[in-house]
Every structure is written in structure tokens, then in C-alpha cells.
Amino acid sequence: MKFDVSLSNRSYTKFDVDPGMLHQVDEALFPFNTNWKRVGVNVSGGADSAVGTATLCSIIERLGLDTEIVFLTNVRVWNNRPWAGPISVEVYEKIQSMFPQIKMTRVQNYIPPELEDGSIGIIEQIGTSGDRICTRSFNAFASYTYKLDAVYGFITANPDDEEFIFDRGGPYDRAWTPEALEEATFCPQITPDSKLTHVLPWKLITKDFIMGQYIRRGWQELLEITRSCEGDKNLFEFMETEPFKDYTEYEHGVTPLVTCGDVTDNVQEGCFWCAERDWALKRAKKIMETPL
């Protein structure tokens, strides 16, 4: 039994993407131009961006290229999730240790919590939320400033499995269908514009494939560092002993961290990202029990 990445692979054919820049990663095609000398990677500290960056590094290493990787991290909701920044540093350092021959640097951006979608919603004048415009603008700035040939993002498609049930509302609208791909007017995974080339290898692939990569590559140590849970400090109110009251009392590596799975027996009662990660890991293990 294989992971279903057919929609993603079909996209490259539909939009006549140069086969020379497509690299086979198990069932999936991964876009990377071997002429690129410096690329940016949006790394949050989550599982998707960590394995996406490691996959990119493995391609560069296998081909013996001298492409440089620039980690671009947006520190967000620092007051309610003070662990996010330090975890992104740990992910960076872990990937450095995994691929010591590849030159890597890290650049950190800051997004004020007051501009987050959850705080002020959509800003009418720009038609999007403050955090999204900050991220897009930072990518454009970084692309120009650091002379990046492309910037990678590692968002994934929403689960389309009937076993995944998450009825909490919210902007979880990244599901893709064959009909949606037919209606698309440009390749969803590679979107060049006047400011940067944005590459989204996982955009039409669900998270079970991503979890399968951790298992297949033996990258469990990297997975253990990452954090998908977006439950903030209020999550700790459900614990018998609250580890900290606010960011002033948080000490990374000392203060205990919990996820939704620690406060509920049904992870789908927690945040979307914990539910998705739990589903993806279980499904990946189920798929991989059957030989490819």
C-alpha cells in the first residue's frame, strides 16, 4: 500500500514543470532547481517544515551541490507560546548536525501578537490578516536581501480521510480535489512572481506522507524536537500543576511542555494541529505495515 500523492504529481504534468527540476522522494515528486545557489526555507519548528527542509538537504547532499540554505523563522505569539522560538532554534541545530556539509544560516523575524488573525481578524485595507502580510513581506524582503533563488514553504493539504473528524470550525481550508486542480490557472506548488519564487512541495500532499518520511528516513529524533500543537499557555490550566503562569516564568528546557494529548484522552478535542498530527502518524504506520 502506498501513500496517495497522485494529485501532487499530476500538477507538475498539468503545468509542464521541467522534469529536470523534479526529484523523486519515494512516491512524490519534489521540486528543486539544481542551479539554485541559495534558497530560503520557512521553518517554524513544526513537523512539516522540519522534514521538508531535511528532505531538501538530503537532495542537495546526494547530488553533491553547494547550495546554501537560509532558515527563515517568524516568531509568533511569543507571549502565549514562549517555547516556539527556542524550538525553531533546536530544529535548526538538529538539521545542521544531520547535514554538516551543507552551509546553513538562520534569520529570525518577529510578528506582533496584536497583528495575528486571532487578535484582529482580517484587515480590510489589505484584505488579509496581519500575520499573513508580515510573513509574505518578510519572504520578499529576505529573498531580495539575501539574494535567494527561491523560498520554500511546507504547508500541507488537509486530511481527506473519513477517519479524520474535526468539527471545530476555523480556516482549515487547505483540502485539494482533482476538480480544484483542474480549475487552477498556475502550478500550486511553484508560484513565481516579481519578488520571489515560492515553492510549496507539500501543498497537495496530506500529512500522513510527511510522517512516513520521518519513519522511512529514521528521522525520529528530529520529529521529537518539533511541536505541532498550537495550544497556548491556557492549555496548562487543565493540568493538575500549572508549570508557568506567563512567559516571564518560562524557561526553555526546564519548564515542562504539554500538548493537547496530555490534557484530553480524545486529541480531536484539542487543537486542529494535534488532531492532524495524531491522525497522520497513525495512518502512516498503517500504510507502511503493507510492503510497497
Image: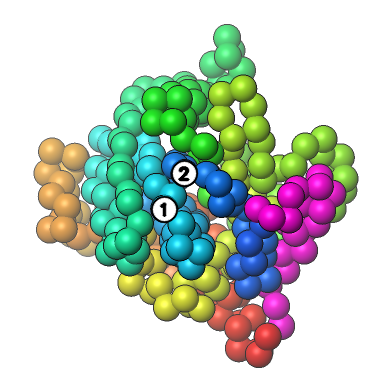
Between 227 and 144, the one lying in front of the other is 144
**Where is residue 7 drawn, in percent x and y?**
77, 58
Quarter residue 76 falls in: top left
Other residues around mark 1 within 10 Å, as few (<14) / some (14–19) / many (≥20): some
Q: Are dots 2 and 1 in contact, CB under 8 Å?
A: yes
Residue under the image location 32 percent in, 29 percent down: 110
Position above or below: 211 against 169: below
Whether residue 8 is in magenta: the answer is yes
Position above or below: 263 against 148: below
Q: Total label count?
A: 2
**Where is residue 66 drawn, in percent x and y?**
41, 53
On the image, numbered disc 2 is attached to which residue? 37
Q: Is mark 1 on a helix, strand or loop?
A: loop
Between 92 and 247, the one lying in front of the other is 92
The answer, for residue 4, to whether it is visible in the render is yes
Residue under the image location 46 percent in, 57 percent down: 65
Going by the numbered disc 2, the residue's amino acid type is: Lys
Other residues around mark 2 within 10 Å, as few (<14) / some (14–19) / many (≥20): some
Residue 158 numbered tag: none
Q: Report the span colored magenta.
A: 1-21
Going by the numbered disc 1, the residue's amino acid type is: Asp
**Where is residue 184 drawn, in percent x and y?**
82, 39
Residue 66 numbered tag: 1
Between 272 and 62, the one lying in front of the other is 62
Whether residue 2 is in magenta: the answer is yes
Colour scheme shown: rainbow
**Is 100 on the left or on the right of 203, as rendered?**
left
Location of the N terminus (image quadrant):
bottom right
Residue under the image location 59 percent in, 49 percent down: 33
> Between disc 2 and disc 1, whose residue precedes?
2
**Where is residue 126 drawn, in percent x and y?**
58, 14
